[in-house]
Amino acid sequence: GCGGRVVDGAAYDGRPAAFYGVVGLEAIWREAVCRAKREVGRYYYLDNAYFDATRGKHFRVGVNALQATGCERPDWQRFSRITLGIQPWRRDGRHVVVVEQSEHFMAVVAGWPAPAWREHVVQTLRQHTDRLIVVRHWQRDKAERVRTLREDLKDAWAVVTHTSAAANEALVAGIPVFVTGPSAAAVMGSSDLTAIEKPRRPDGRYDWAAALAGRQWTVEELRDGTAWKALNEA
């Protein structure tokens, strides 16, 4: 859709590159990131959808970032095609859900070993809340993760993660979020775990969701240039 070509690590020449995930691409992904930081060049990071409602059907694209910010221009036309059912903010809840990400992702991308991240988060939360802490360990079966997340979100006070899309699902369900990394949910949440008992519940979730809807596309839209055109018009 952009007139590019597929190369392996040995053939990567430093020009703007696109990646789907980072497994197996760590070296050239890091080089592309470094290049984008020191020059005007770009890299494009692709991964699954921002919302479970379109998982496997739409794929997100971040420009010089793993995720969009949620502050982009809302795309109401694309948003209207997604049945999200954004719920009012929840004002009560029994437990805090801590969502882990894979050890590979945390080590390569976050630069924070998953066990150390989990220990830091749980210890900090225990110092500032008496609520039950439910840790969701990462698992490869994404369909099962979607199903069990819905169960864990029932009666949840808040969700804590690094950059997992679980934070987006929490926001749709009206549950406050805390993120420790550059997540698309950050603008609607907080990074201050010490404020777990006073979570942010900002206005603007519809605009936020519509912005993310405008940064994910079907495979056909990636192939026919629709996504490329939108990214270059942004």
Image (tube, rainbow, N blue to C red):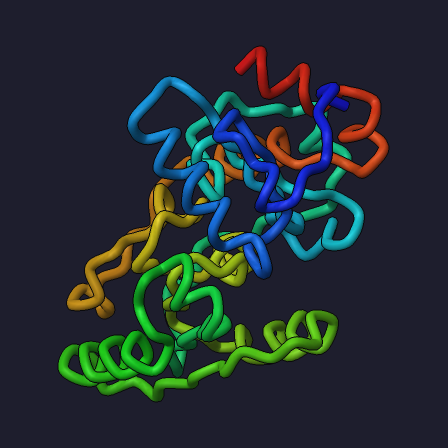
> Residue at 40% of width from left, 38% of height from top?
33
* Residue 214 placement (x, y as % from top left): 62, 29
Nearest the viewer among 28 and 212 is: 28
> Residue at 64% of width from left, 47% of height from top?
20
Nearest the viewer among 2 and 61 is: 2
Left or right side of 132 for 90: right
Nearest the viewer among 102 and 156 is: 102
* Residue 99 placement (x, y as % from top left): 45, 73
Q: Quadrant of residue 158?
A: bottom left
Q: Quadrant of residue 35?
A: top left
* Residue 157 placement (x, y as % from top left): 38, 72
* Residue 217 placement (x, y as % from top left): 72, 34
Left or right side of 138 for 118: left
> Residue at 30% of width from left, 74% of height from top?
117
Residue 85 appears in view: no
**Number of marks:** 0
Left or right side of 171 for 145: right
Residue 148 appears in view: yes
Q: Is residue 155 positioned above or below 29 on the image?
A: below
